[in-house]
Image: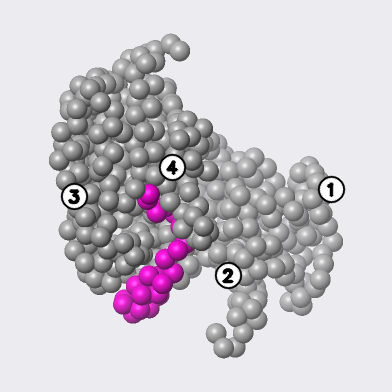
Amino acid sequence: MAAPAARRCCLGWDFSTQQVKVVAVDSNLNVFYEKSVQFDRDVPEFGTQGGVHVHEDGLTVTSPVLMWVQALDIVLKTMKASGFDFSQVIALSGAGQQHGSVYWKAGASRTLASLSPDLLLRQQLEACFSVGDSPVWMDSSSTEQCRQLEAATGGAQALSRLTGSRAYERFTGNQIAKIYQQNPEAYSHTERISLVSSFAASLFLGSYCPIDYSDGSGMNLLQIHDKAWSPACLHACAPHLEDKLGQPVPSHAVVGAISPYYVQRYGFHPECKVVAFTGDNPASLAGMQLAEGDIAVSLGTSDTLFLWLQEPRPSLEGHIFCNPVDPQHYMALLCFKNGSLMRERIRDESAFCSWDEFSKALRTTEMGNGGNLGFYFDVMEITPEIVGRHRFNAEGQEVSAFPRDVEIRALIEGQFMAKRIHAEGLGYRVMSKTKILATGGASHNRDILQVLADVFGAPVYVTDTANSACVGSAYRAFHGLATGPDAPFAEIVKLAPRPRLAATPAPGAAQVYEALLLRYAKLEQRILSQTRGPSE
């Protein structure tokens, strides 16, 4: 492999569920190098499947901390062997899978600060963790701790107003509480608790890196409005927790220079800066170059929305995080389970297994579908908590079936109306400058994107975000280097490749969907009340 041409650059790292990946981005914001290590394939000795261990109870899901360390060793060794010129790296930042946590054993800070350049990280950090297997975002074993946290803070809605989310099993505060309750000895031997993001940053820094505001707001511990740990939440989870977490910092903060270990072993410049790492979802917001008022829609196995918010309204659904590129604003995240698999089922049932026929149905049916509305949830949905298929005609009567073409449009219109309704429930408003950035498999279907543009009343752009967390991390490294904390992120990324316009709202769309959105919201509440029953 030829050595990459030397050029000043920033590195963007991503410690995700299944791999560690890095990209190098030059000062013109061109990606010119990338490398990844897949856990299952490249470090098979840890025995993971999909990067994790699913325990016997089916609820506990963990990843070995040393697997992440060894993967970093392999990436750096490969980069060096390829002739990558580390001396040209002016800064680096990164992302980590959200909600994972790492428990540093007492004395680990001394080891981090005195790493020998003659040895790999894995060899030196082997005894540095009081919990060897980190709970990760797929873990759902802390229901009891979630109930305790909500009870201690005045209920689910009160906790959401405080921290941006009601209590979720995967959120770090509840995972810490579980470890404290079930393994108090390990907790007592822990001197620092990191998120996956701040753990990875600590490896580069040679000291404990603070948790950033954005990833910190996915813990059920951070007060999102004043960006400080909540005393009530800390007290409810475990003793001495503030000391073990350290104080959070802005997501654009330069947390220090790179550890001498990397200077001596790999040839990094000693002035190379480390910018606070953040979560993978916030890093993706940066990678997709979202701006105020924008919305990103990822149309994959599950559908995910990222929203840029000025004045959020935390609720019992979705999540509000501190914005990773503008500390005065927020981002929201909504997830819908019934995404591409639901679209594929309706394609198979109503379009002869053909996307061409599916698209034709969308083109030949009218906006608003003659007033016919549908809810399609073959698995229990997250937002809202509904399961089953529910179809309603223009008179609001529930019917058992629709004609094939009507069924297809009802599915797509319903999916996008649900997204808009629940986004607005968190405080989002479509503005004249709003852009929608669509990614994922269904973003390649222009007819689906046309419905998205019509329902939201905003233009839809497409972008290649295969490496959005990595690339966003490199962009954030440049942002951290910019003079002054108020340097606008949009200025930093103005040279980056721009998304392509894919669809604009059709004339009259706003009038059609204004009424339909109200009907859809009322029908959703009707289904929910029937499902829950009068006792709820």
The residue labelled by disc 2 is: 385
Residue drawn at the location 74% of the way across and 57% of the way down? 409
Which element type, helix, strand or loop, lies under badge 3?
A: loop
Q: Position of residue 526 (x, y in %)?
A: 64, 79
**Percent of width and height locating residue 513:** 64, 63
Q: Who is closer to the viewer here, 323 or 129?
A: 129
Q: Which of 115 and 525 is in front in this view?
A: 115
The residue that disc 4 covers is 16
How far is disc 2 from disc 1 in space, using C-alphas? 30 Å
Which circle's residue, 1 or 4, is located before the other in the chain? 4
> On the picture, is 400 further left or further right than 459?
right
Relative to 343, 170 lies left or right: left
Marks 1 and 3 sit apart, C-alpha to C-alpha, by 62 Å
- SS assignment at label 2: loop
Q: Name the residue under label 3.
A: 106
Q: What element carries label 1?
A: loop
Q: Label 1 vs label 4: CA separation?
A: 37 Å
Question: Is 525 positioned to the left or the right of 248 in the image?
Answer: right
